[in-house]
Image: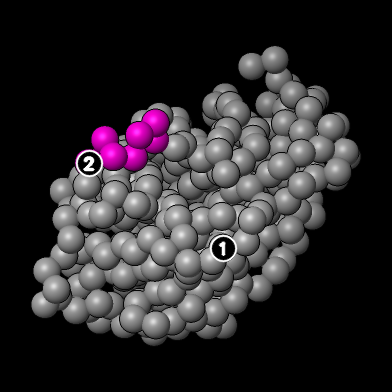
Amino acid sequence: MPAVEPDNILLLPRLREPDQSLRTKEVLVRTQAPRFLEGAGFPVRRPFPSRDIPFAMSDPFLLLDHMGAVEYAPGEAKGAPWHPHRGFETVTYIVDGAFRHRDSHGGGGLITNGATQWMTAGSGLLHDEMPPDDLVKRGGLFHGVQLWVNLPRKLKMVPPRYQSIESDQVQLLTSADGSAVIRLIAGELEGFRGPGLTRTPITYAHVSLPPGSQLRLLWPQGFNAVVYALAGEGVVGEDVPITEGEAIVLGAGDVLGIQAARIQSAKTPRLEVLLLGGSPLREPVFSYGPFVMNTRAEILQAIEDFQSGKMGHIPAAGLLGDDPR
Ligand code: MN
């Protein structure tokens, strides 16, 4: 898994071992992510929104799509061609391979191994999310996630903004025993900060735990907490098993506890998890496809604005193949 790896894990800043008297967070829900076809027909696993994890539980996170890991055959890789968004942020983290992004504001680029693109759709734009042409032609490994982060009512119509977070900008940390690699993409953990600029308080991290590794970390107060397994096997909380494609929602307690199983498969030798937490917005959500607003009237307005071109137009170059850019 070529997401960013430290040269020497022992040189990373270490999280403190939380006081033993602090309570480990309890598990509220464990669920296997249902599978869907997204965009032009690429397979995703979507732990939420789902029957087991409704929005009220993941708020302010609207959706998580796990893409791959998949070894595409030549001609097989697909993406999500030109479509609009309004009212929230899409956060695309690529673990293996590459995803190409272009948008109606002239932005674009390649998101590759360990990099994140944080796109605030805000008032609206059109974008195109596709595997690069050479991945389509030759096939290859692809593995990534897209997270949708809601915007509060007062920020839904902010101008679009992009953050390209390269893999070497991510804040690397290790557990108190120096065994786990924590990649803090955004938000705060025990005083350390990730590079992603967030509109409301959230924490987003990718953690790799080698066999038998144990992580106990003090979770920000007032944040909800979701653990999603990208690969491998382990235990969350005191004793709840987790494996690839499963999500666990945590409840009361101070410390987020995760342990990797002592035996992992040869193909995925570590437990790889995403940690997601945030302050719930607790606002009404009215969503329709790629638009997420607070009311039905705002959704109708979004559809009208998109149809009348107010969210932008597909650039002429966008109708061709790969940009030279
Ligand atoms: Mn999109």
**Front residue of 15 and 87:** 15
- Element class at badge 2: loop
**Front residue of 272 and 167:** 272
Q: Which mark is residue 13?
A: 2
Is 290 covered by the magenta stretch? no
Residue picked out by circle 1: 264
Q: Earlier in the sequence, mark 1 or mark 2?
A: 2
Look at the magenta stretch and give its main secondary structure: loop
Relative to 24, is 162 above or below? above
Q: Residue at x 42, y 64 (%)?
A: 212
Q: As drawn, is 144 to the left or to the right of 255?
A: right
- Element class at badge 1: loop
Quadrant where the image shows the C terminus: top right
**CA distance separating discs 1 and 2:** 26 Å
Q: Amino acid at mark 2?
A: Pro
Q: Residue 288: name its quadrant.
A: bottom right
Colour scheme in use = one colour
Q: Amino acid at mark 1?
A: Gln
Q: Residue 236: name its quadrant.
A: bottom left
Relative to 303, is 296 above or below? below
Q: Residue at x 46, y 60 (%)?
A: 211
Q: As drawn, is 245 to the left or to the right of 16?
A: right
Q: As drawn, is 9 to the left or to the right of 267?
A: left
Q: Nearer the viewer, mark 1 or mark 2?
A: 1
Q: Residue at x 50, y 48 (%)?
A: 90
Q: Which residues are magenta?
A: 6-13
Quadrant where the image shows the N terminus: top right
